């Protein structure tokens, strides 16, 4: 039997249900939670991604780096090949706003006071408070050709004195501005692996999908081919390809050729993962339903099966790009990849592969910091994209 209190609670629940039925609350009139039930897949992915704060910050860093690479001629204050024998191994200059306790209203840098060390005979540079160079935005300076198409001499910032010195990252052994060379090197290092990465991604999904979907004899042939390609050592292959490509090719053209050829080998890791996923997915109900409905096999692979593990594909893509960047840096550092006069982060680090640079010019390792920041940003961004690609996962 129900007590009086139980009857009261039951009647209150009935009245509440009737009130909700007669006066329904629309999703837009409530807080964020009900919106999940009417949101699209892309909305869910965006909400999930922006909750990963580190991934959002890393994405902004990656976009900033590619923006710098895209407009490197405009951002860099000098020509990357311009040199000055008066400022070899000059240290980085510090930007100041105050001079003798007085605010100057415009940022400036002190000039150099050069003197030779009597013991080591090395040139020593010290700030010269008597010489100041003010920094200006949108300064006319060294002429350049934006993207090889448009002539201009406008730079984002610089100094107006033609004989002044502005070395924010210091200079190298030839007196070339390291900041300018790092900015120009970003274009090569950030873009050189993109073609190879996307080509390897396409081949990995296509060949791995065919291997896992069809199985049988085709699967055996493709897996033995993958095992053979994975057994080839990379460094000797780079050396052989460097020697085999035409001698009249430029260094940049040779490197692009090697990158594309190696991308034909680099698809094997992703192909193995895709094959394993397809072996487990090809017996699922949604795949069988699509086949019975008459959907073509290539559409089943690309439209139904691949999106089911999109998170892993995104993670593989975001990890492959920094791998290409590290490969370019390492091979150029060893003298196998890019070579001067091409400017890349690896070529710049090659200038610092001696003890003298480590002792007397540690700023030559600044391009290595850009490599580290770029790789970490890609990895964190990949973590966020991987989680966002599967918003229903707990």
Image: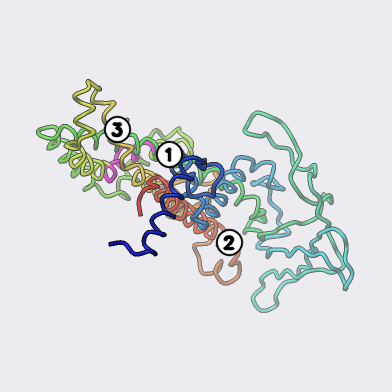
Secondary structure mostly seen in the magenta stretch: helix
Which quarter of the picture shows residue 241?
Answer: top left
Residue 350 in sight from this viewpoint: no
- Residue 56 in percent (x, y) is at 53, 52
Residue bearing mark 1: 41
In space, the residues marked 3 and 2 are separated at their CA atoms by: 50 Å
Q: Earlier in the sequence, mark 2 or mark 1?
A: 1
In space, the residues marked 2 and 1 are separated at their CA atoms by: 47 Å
Q: Are marks 3 and 2 in contact (CB under 8 Å)?
A: no
In this view, the mark in front (2 or 1): 1
Q: Residue furthest left?
A: 217
Mark 3 burial class by Cα count in 10 Å: few <14, some 14-19, many 20+:
some
Helix or strand or loop: what does disc 1 sit on? helix
Residue range in magenta is: 260-270
Q: In the figure, is residue 7 to the left or right of 233? A: right
Q: Earlier in the sequence, mark 3 or mark 1?
A: 1
Residue bearing mark 2: 364
Between 301 and 6, the one nearer to me in the picture: 6
């Amino acid at each position: 039997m129900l007590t009086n209190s139980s009857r009261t609670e039951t009647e209150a629940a009935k009245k509440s249900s009737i009130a909700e039925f007669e006066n329904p609350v629309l999703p837009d009139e409530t807080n964020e939670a009900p919106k999940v039930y009417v949101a699209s897949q892309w909305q869910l992915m965006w909400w999930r991604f922006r909750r990963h704060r580190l991934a959002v910050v890393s994405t902004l860093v990656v976009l900033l780096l590619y923006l710098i690479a895209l407009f490197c001629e405009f951002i860099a204050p000098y020509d990357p090949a311009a040199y000055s024998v008066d400022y070899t191994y000059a240290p980085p200059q510090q930007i100041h706003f105050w001079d003798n306790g007085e605010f100057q209203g415009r940022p400036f840098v002190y000039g150099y006071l050069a003197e030779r060390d009597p013991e080591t005979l090395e040139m020593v540079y010290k700030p010269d408070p008597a010489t100041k160079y003010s920094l200006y935005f949108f300064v006319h300076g060294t002429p350049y050709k934006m993207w090889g198409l448009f002539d201009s001499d406008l730079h984002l910032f610089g100094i107006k004195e033609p004989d002044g010195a502005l070395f924010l990252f210091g200079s190298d052994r030839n007196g070339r501005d390291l900041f300018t060379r790092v900015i120009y090197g970003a274009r090569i290092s950030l873009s050189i692996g993109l073609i190879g990465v996307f080509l390897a991604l396409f081949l990995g999904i296509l060949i791995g999908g065919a291997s896992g979907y069809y199985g049988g004899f085709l699967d055996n042939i493709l897996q033995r081919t993958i095992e053979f390609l994975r057994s080839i050592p990379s460094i000797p292959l780079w050396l052989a390809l460097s020697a085999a490509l035409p001698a009249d090719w430029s260094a940049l053209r040779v490197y692009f050729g090697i990158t594309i050829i190696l991308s034909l080998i680099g698809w094997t890791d992703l192909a193995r993962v895709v094959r394993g996923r397809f072996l487990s997915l090809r017996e699922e109900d949604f795949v069988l339903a699509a086949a019975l409905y008459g959907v073509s096999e290539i559409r089943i692979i690309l439209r139904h099966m691949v999106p089911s593990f999109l998170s892993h594909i995104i993670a593989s893509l975001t990890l492959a790009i920094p791998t290409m960047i590290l490969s370019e840096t390492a091979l150029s550092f060893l003298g196998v990849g890019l070579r001067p006069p091409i400017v890349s982060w690896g070529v710049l680090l090659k200038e610092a592969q001696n003890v003298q640079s480590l002792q007397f010019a540690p700023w030559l390792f600044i391009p290595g910091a850009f490599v580290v920041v770029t790789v970490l940003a890609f990895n964190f961004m990949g973590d966020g994209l991987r989680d966002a690609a599967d918003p229903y996962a707990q």
